[in-house]
Each structure stands twice: as structure tokens, then as C-alpha cells.
Amino acid sequence: MITEPKISLFSERPYVGIRVKTPFKGMFAVVDKLLKELRAWVKLHGIADEGPFFLRYHVIDMEGMMDIEVGFMVGNPRKGDDRVQPGVLPAGRYAHLTYSRYALRGNKALIGWIQQNNVKVDRWDDEEGDAFACRYEAYLTDYRVEPRKSAWEIELAIKVADDA
């Protein structure tokens, strides 16, 4: 399932997250480990009913290091600790869609739609790769209800440039 891409205005969304750099090869094993760690932190702090969890891509380099963050959206800003840090998904217009099962197809659909519609996203070339003001995949399905990732609904969103 892949929904039609669209552009929507999103408000600022506070979160807590763990940010790391990891090679693309093996990245999803790292993400699974970080999700498990963050779930335990969220439960310990009594905020498990907020959310959702998400994976944010700060810098993408498929051949080098990926700068990623596993996060959890919260209703109000929270303090972190040495490992889990507070952050904000910035307000603005986002190109987005929802998919399940096929991450590559979902990403190709959104990127293709962005290109076909001449949408200018808030990104820049960085010495470490393709940097984004905000690009994320939010896990809309509650993992406590549906543990199979292949059945999850995932929102893929990329912030549109403010001057676009």
C-alpha cells in the first residue's frame, strides 16, 4: 500500500531521540537496537502512550556514513539525558505519503512525485552526503499491537523548502 503523495502544513513537533552515525550496510540492525533502547527509556519515563516512534535521516550517504536519529514524538518538550536527547521536527510544509511493506517503493514514489511536480525540498549538499532539514519515517502502527514490521503503516515525510 502506498498513498498518494501530497503537501501538508505540519506544526512543530517535540521529540526525544538517539542520534548516531552508522554505515548504510547494517543500518537497520542498528535502528532495531536503538528502537529497543528508546522504547525502554520511554516506558521508564511513563510516556509510552505518546508517540509515534520515527527514524529521522539527517544526512544520507548510501556509500558512507548515515547520520540518523531514532526518535519518539512527545506532546510537550522533555528533558533528555546523556544518551536520549530532546529535539524538534520543525514546522513547515512537508511532502509526504504513507506506505506499508515496501520502503524502497514508498521512497521512490515520494521522490518521483517531488521531481515530477518540481517541489523544492529543504536539503543541501554536505561534505558527509545529502543533508535534510527534516526527512523522517514515522511508525504509525503501534508495535505493541502489531509486532510484524511488514504490516506497519509508515509515514514518509520530507520538509519542503521555505522559499518554495
Image (cartoon, helix red, strand yellow):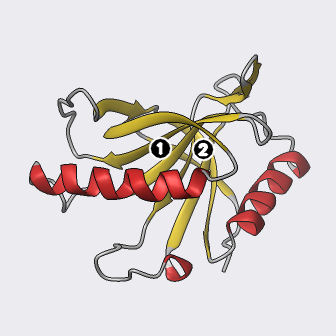
Residue 156: image location, x then y, percent: 60, 56
Q: Nearer the viewer, residue 61 or 94?
A: 61
Q: Are marks 1 and 2 in contact (CB under 8 Å)?
A: yes
Residue 141 vertical placement versus 91 (above, below) = below
Secondary structure under tag 2 reads: strand
Q: Which residue is mark 2?
A: 94
| Residue drawn at (69%, 50%) of the image | 25
Which amino acid lies under the numbered mark 2 shown in the image of this protein?
Answer: Tyr
Residue 88: image location, x then y, percent: 38, 32
Q: Which mark is residue 44?
A: none
In the rendered structure, the answer to whether residue 17 lies left or right of residue 94 reads left
Residue 52 vertical placement versus 56 (above, below) = below
In the rendered structure, the answer to whether residue 155 lies left or right of residue 91 reads right
Residue 53 vertical placement versus 131 (above, below) = below
In the rendered structure, the answer to whether residue 45 lies left or right of residue 27 reads left
Would you call the spot at circle 1 few (<14 residues within 10 Å), some (14-19), or many (20 or more)? few
Q: Earlier in the sequence, mark 1 or mark 2?
A: 1
Q: Which mark is residue 10?
A: 1
Q: Nearer the viewer, residue 121 or 143?
A: 143
Q: Quadrant of the N terminus?
A: bottom right
